[in-house]
Amino acid sequence: MKQFLMTVAGVFVGLVLFLVGVPFLLIVMAASAARPAPVPTHTVLQLDLRGGLSDQESQNPFASLGGGSGQSVMSIIQTLRRAETDDKVEAVLVRLPEGGMAPASADELRLAFKHFRAVGKKPIFAHSQGLYPSGLVTSTYMLGSAASEFWMQPDSSLQAVGAASEEMFFKRFFDKYGVKADYEQRYEYKNAVNPYLYSDYTPAHRESTLSWMGSVYTTALTTAAQDRKVDPAALIKTIEAGPYSAEEAKAKGLIDRVGQVKDVQDAMLSRAGKGAKLLDFDDYASRAKKAPAKTGGSTIAVVSAEGAIMTGSGQGGSPFGGDSTIYSDQVAKALYDAIDDKDVKAIVFRVSSPGGSDTASEQILAAVKAAKKANKPIVVSMGTYAASGGYWISSGASAIVAEPTTLTGSIGVFGGKFALGDALARFGVDVKQVHVGSDYSGAFGTGQGFTPDQRARFAAWMDRIYAGFVHRVAEGRKLPEDRVREIAKGRVWTGVQAKQLGLVDELGGFYEAVDKAKSLAGIKGEVKLKKVGGSTSPFEALEKLLGVSETSARTLAASAWILGDPRSQSILDEMAKARLRATPSGASVLADTPVH
C-alpha cells in the first residue's frame, strides 16, 4: 500500500509539473517571439563578460534553462558588426571578468572591438573590478587594452603578473590503493593521461606546456603594448613588477581611468547625448536577430562545431543540457547540405574542439573533403582550440585560419583503461572474467591490466590510428609525412606556432576566415552569411521532446498566452460552439493552425 501511494504521489507531482511547467515554458517562448521594443535613439550597450563565454551559440535552444551562460564569442562579434552601423548605438561598455579568459576568445573579441572602433567611429570603454591571478589573466588585460578607455574600480588590484598552470598527479595515490592506469600514448607529447601515469611532469610534458603558455603570455602582452602604444618590453617589465592598486596602475600607464562602474556609465551616457539609455547587450542581440536578414550578395554557408567529437546524431539527450558536443551525423549533414545548396559559393567551418572519437572525426573530415571536391572552398575558422580530433576534422580544409593563441595540433592518440581488480580486492570485491573467441575480446575488462598479447594488439591499433592521422595531415596540408611526424607526437601548438610550422595558413578570427573564403571562391563585394545546421527553434525542440508538431506547439503557446484573459476565454468558447454546430454529428475539431 505504501509503495502504491508513493507511486500515485509521484504520478500526481509529475502531472502537476507537466501541466504547469510546460504551459509556462510555452508562454515564455511566445513572449520571446513577440515583436521587440525599439532601440532607444541614443543607446549605450552594456556587455558583461563576467559570466563566462562559450565559443559558439548552444545547439540546444533550452540550454540557458539548464545552467548555460547563453553568451558566446560568435554571437557577440556578429552583434557588434550590426551595432557598428546602427545609428542608434553610440558606444559600448564592457564589464571585464576578474580572472582569466580563454586566450583565443580574447583574441577574437579584440578584433571585434578594433573593427567596431574603426568602422563605427564609436568608443568602447572597458571597466574592471580587479584582475587577479586566476587562469590566463593577461588575456583579459589584453582585451581591456583594446578599448578606447580602460577603467578600474578604486582600490581594486591589477595582478596580471604572469601565467601559471597546476596539474595534479595521481600515480602515487593509485599505487597506494592498487589502481593501475594502463594506457598507450602516441607519442611523448600526448600528455592527457600523464597525471595517471606519473608523479611529476615528464620532460616532454613540461616542455610542451611551457612552450604554449609562453607563446600565449608573450602574444597577449605584446598585443596589449601595441594597443596602448608603448614598448612591449617596457610593458612586460612593468606588469611583472606588480601587483598594483588601480591608482598605481593608472600612474604607471597600465590603465586610463579609476572609477566605479556608475562613474563610467554616467560618463558614457553624457557623451552619448541627451536622453541616452543603457541597454543590455543580450537584449540588443535578441532584437538584432529578429531584424530582416541581408538579401543581396553571394552566399557563404557557416557551419559550427564546438565540444567533444562523438558519433551519432545527438538525439535522446536532456533538452535542457548545456554541454556542447559535436555529433558527427549532425555536422556532416550540415556540411553536405551546404554542398548541395546551389546558392552557397563557399563554406566557413567554425571549429572549437579538444578532440574525441577518431571515427566520428573521420566522418566529418570526409564531408570537408567532399566540399573541396565539389569546388566549394571550405575555410576552417579555429576558436578556443582545434586540437587532436579538432585538428583532424580541420586538416582537409581549403585553408585554415586560427587566432594567435588558439590551441591546435596535438596530432596524436591515446587509449587504455583503469585496472581496478587489486583495488577492489582490498574491499572484498573480486572481479572475474570469462570470454569466448579471441583473448582480445576481454582486453578492456577492469579486473586486470592488458596481457602481453592484448597490449601488442592494442598498441598496433594505436599505431594504425596515429599513422592514419599523420597521413591525413600530410595530405591536407601538403607536407611531407616525415615533416608531420616531427611536429606531431601529440604536441599542442598555439596559432602563432602552428602558422610557422605550416599547420595553419593565416592568423585571424571568424571574419578573416570569411574574407579568405571570398577570395578562394572569387567573390567580389559583400556576401550573405547563411547558418547551416546547428540549433533548432524551441518549438522544434518541443516537437521532439513532447511528440507534437511544431505548429501545434506554437498553437499551444499562443493559446496559453490569451487564455489568461477572461474576454479571450469567452470568445474562444463562442468559437468552439460555432465550430461544433458546423461539424457533422457534433464531432470535435482541433485546429492545427496558430492562434493570433
Image (cartoon, rainbow, N blue to C red):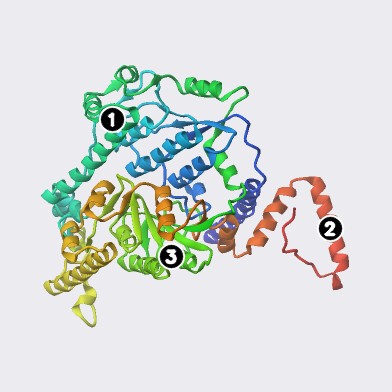
Numbered disc total: 3
Secondary element under disc 2, as helix, strand or loop, is helix
| CA neighbours of label 2 inside 10 A, class few (<14), some (14 to 19), many (20+) | few
Q: Residue at point 21% right, 66% down?
A: 466
| CA neighbours of label 1 inside 10 A, class few (<14), some (14 to 19), many (20+) | many
Secondary element under disc 3, as helix, strand or loop, is loop
Front in this rendered view, residue 34 or 443:
34
User: Which residue carries the number 1 mark?
Assistant: 160
User: Which residue carries the number 2 mark?
Assistant: 575
Amino acid on which the number 1 mark rests in the picture = Ala
Find residue 545 and name its label: none
Q: Earlier in the sequence, mark 1 or mark 2?
A: 1
Q: Residue furthest bottom?
A: 437
Query: Would residue 354 be found to the left or right of residue 558 on screen?
Result: left
Of badges 2 and 3, nearer the viewer stands 3
Q: Disc 2 and disc 3: Cα gap in Å?
A: 54 Å
Query: Would residue 431 be found to the left or right of residue 172 on screen?
Result: right
Q: Disc 3 and disc 1: Cα gap in Å?
A: 44 Å
Q: Earlier in the sequence, mark 3 or mark 1?
A: 1
Amino acid on which the number 3 mark rests in the picture = Lys
With respect to residue 471, does 48 lie above or below?
A: above
Q: Position of residue 269 (x, y in %)?
A: 55, 23
Amino acid on which the number 2 mark rests in the picture = Met
Secondary element under disc 1, as helix, strand or loop, is loop
User: Which residue carries the number 3 mark?
Assistant: 376
Q: Residue at point 72% right, 53% down?
A: 559
With respect to residue 257, does 168 lie above or below?
A: below
